[in-house]
């Protein structure tokens, strides 16, 4: 089992994301959307029960779905992860131990929540900075924000965008279809 592809994959994920689970969620979620999109498009293309005329409509629609799913998921989750991470790095959101440390040190206390404060730099210069508490909280907050963003993206934003795109694709498809005799549109 130690040399199996699954074990190697799990080791790679662990080694690359053990300190930042939010990044793991963004990367694996984006990969998941990509793989499911490939499967969806492949199922349409290689299904002999789907007529060629239907495929000419379904394949472009599946490509649009893929682009929207992958793009919206990545952009929304990555942006949220960066915003929450920045909020934690500036002390805008922080656990009690970190707040107490910052409030005791007037050098930092006035900068809390402002962009010129970087707690990742503070902990390098301050041996008494509650590093474990800070990193655990930052990882927790960014992970929670990323999970929320993935739910928002997958269940609210992408369906709205996909419906709009599918409607446009359908209109173009219907307008380009050969018309029955009598020039009546169907």
Image (cartoon, rainbow, N blue to C red):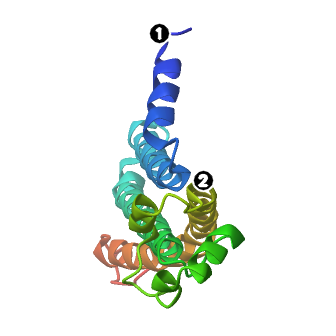
Instruction: Give the left or right position of residue 145, taking residue 113 as reference.
Output: right
State the SS at label 2. Answer: helix
- The residue under label 1 is 3
Q: Nearer the viewer, residue 165 or 94?
A: 94
Label 1 crowd bin: few (<14), some (14–19), many (20+), radius 10 Å: few
Q: Is residue 143 above or below residue 46?
A: below
Task: Please identify the quarter of the rendering in which residue 121 is found.
Answer: bottom left
Q: Quadrant of the C terminus?
A: bottom left
Figure label count? 2
Asked if marks 1 and 2 touch (Cβ < 8 Å), the reply is no
Q: Earlier in the sequence, mark 1 or mark 2?
A: 1
Q: Quadrant of the N terminus?
A: top right
Alpha-carbon distance for marks 1 and 2?
33 Å
Task: Please identify the quarter of the rendering in which residue 118 is found.
Answer: bottom left
Q: How far from the left and from the top, in percent, is residue 82? A: 44, 70
Q: How far from the left and from the top, in percent, is residue 100? A: 66, 76
- The residue at the point 52 percent across, 21 percent down is 6
Q: How far from the left and from the top, in percent, is residue 140? A: 63, 59
- The residue at the point 55 percent across, 57 percent down is 131
- The residue at the point 38 percent across, 42 percent down is 45
State the SS at label 1. Answer: loop
Label 2 crowd bin: few (<14), some (14–19), many (20+), radius 10 Å: few
Which dot marks residue 132?
2
- The residue at the point 39 percent across, 84 percent down is 115
């Amino acid at each position: 089992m130690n040399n199996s592809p699954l074990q190697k994959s799990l080791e790679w994920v662990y080694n690359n994301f053990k300190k930042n689970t939010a990044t793991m969620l963004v990367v694996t979620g984006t990969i998941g959307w990509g793989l499911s999109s490939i499967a969806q498009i492949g199922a349409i293309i290689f299904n002999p029960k789907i007529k060629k005329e239907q495929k000419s409509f379904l394949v472009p629609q599946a490509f649009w779905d893929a682009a929207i799913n992958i793009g919206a998921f990545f952009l929304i989750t990555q942006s949220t992860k960066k915003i929450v991470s920045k909020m934690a790095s500036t002390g805008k959101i922080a656990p009690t131990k970190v707040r107490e440390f910052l409030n005791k040190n007037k050098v930092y206390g006035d900068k809390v929540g402002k962009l010129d404060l970087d707690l990742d730099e503070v902990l390098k210069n301050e041996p008494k900075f509650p590093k474990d508490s800070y990193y655990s909280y930052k990882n927790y907050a960014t992970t929670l924000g990323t999970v929320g963003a993935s739910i928002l993206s997958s269940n609210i934003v992408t369906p709205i965008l996909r419906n709009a795109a599918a409607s446009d694709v359908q209109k173009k498809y219907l307008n380009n279809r050969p018309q029955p005799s009598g020039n009546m549109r169907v």
